[in-house]
Amino acid sequence: MTTTTHHRTPTGPDGPGPLGGHAGRRVLVTGGTGSFGRTVTRRLLDGDVAEVRIFSRDEAKQDALRHELSDPRVRFYVGDVRDFESVRRASRNVDHVFHAAALKQVPSCEFFPLEAVKTNVLGSENVVRASEENGVTSLVCLSTDKAVYPVNAMGMTKAMMEKVARSHGLNDAKATTTVSCVRYGNVMYSRGSVIPLFISQIKAGTQLSVTNPHMTRFMMSLADSVDLVEHAFGHAEQGDLFIRKAPSCTIGDLALALQSLFGVDRPLKVIGSRHAEKISEALATRDELARAEEHGEYFRIPADGRDLNYGEYADDGDHTVDAARDYDSHTVERLDVAAVRRMLLQLPEVRRELSRAGLVDGAAA
């Protein structure tokens, strides 16, 4: 593993500043009405971006976001990444693309795996191909820790998305669009995540339903996920994969930290793991870490540039792999309940809920 210096602007509790590097540019955000899309759009609009295009299937969410933002620089495109023509139309004359559109719910993908293939794999190929045809400068595809040693359909299709994205330059040495990926774990308070569910259960006066209290997950904020993507835009070479270093916590400690903030003390209701859930997640394999570069708070994992002429490499393998280990939520820095409390208090959404409950800084520990 090699190390490079990276200076990052700290993210404060009230949110980071505008994104750099997009002044005067047109930016397309696929899945733009989701949690990430809404966050990155606001960050872009805080800067001097020329235009932000929101691409998604849900016209109702687009209409709500249009009224919420009320910014003439935002344009809305109704379409589906599964439909190449709609993607090509939305990406014409675009400089940068954030590809966030995906099917992300593990249980849903287990029941409808081919739907996950159509969106996460074939849809991503459409985005890559349309970006190249339209002369997009840089495309960053959002992946997940579930793509590492995948055991469920969502993770498998996201792993295939990474392969599609990272093979772009391998298959075309003259490719003009730089395609890279970012991989991160649980985004706190994103749509469908467990924190809003826990808070709603606290407000309803019911027990918090926990799948497995010993299950560990990486934790990061929406702002940090946007910073990771922005780092990729600023540093990516063809086929790169970027990972943000992140602490982890157990699901049980997360539930207890939220109860502590809201002054609640109830026994947790253990309901058992959902379809195809793992006890821990990995953000990077030991093989990836063996060739990774450290960029401060990030890892950069370059694409494997070897071709199919394996004879050249048969007698000289990589001897560094055995020295590394997986970057796993069971083995990285583990936050205790007090540390999780402090992290939760950095989230504007959690502080807003506490304020509504008359607990601006949380209940006393």
Image (cartoon, grey):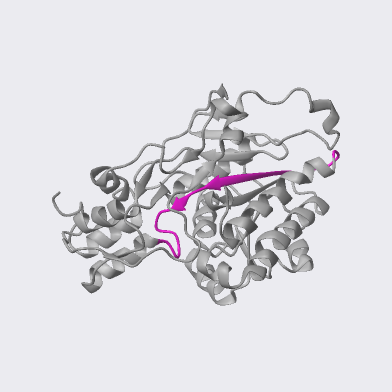
Q: Is residue 187 left or right of residue 362?
A: right
Q: Is residue 347 magenta?
A: no
Residue under the point 56% across and 39% down:
285
Residue under the point 56% across and 56% down:
151
Up-down relation of residue 198 to residue 223 (above or below): below
Q: Please state the extent of the stretch shown in magenta in the rendering.
A: 173-193
Task: Classify residue 358 by image quadrant.
Answer: bottom left
Residue 243 in sight: yes
Residue 95 in sight: no
Q: Is residue 312 left or right of residue 34?
A: right
Residue under the point 59% across and 51% down:
142
Q: Residue furthest front?
A: 315
Q: Nearer the viewer, residue 13 or 124?
A: 124
Residue 136 place in picture, x, y as percent: 75, 49
Q: Residue furthest bottom?
A: 60
Q: Is residue 120 left or right of residue 193?
A: right
Residue 266 place in picture, x, y as percent: 18, 64
Total residue callouts: 0
Residue 51 place in picture, x, y as percent: 64, 55
Say which quadrant the N terminus sits in.
top right
Q: Nearer the viewer, residue 338 or 93?
A: 338
Residue under the point 41% across and 36% down:
10
Up-down relation of residue 104 to residue 294 (above or below): below
Task: Classify residue 102 by image quadrant.
Answer: bottom right
Q: Nearer the viewer, residue 116 or 323?
A: 323
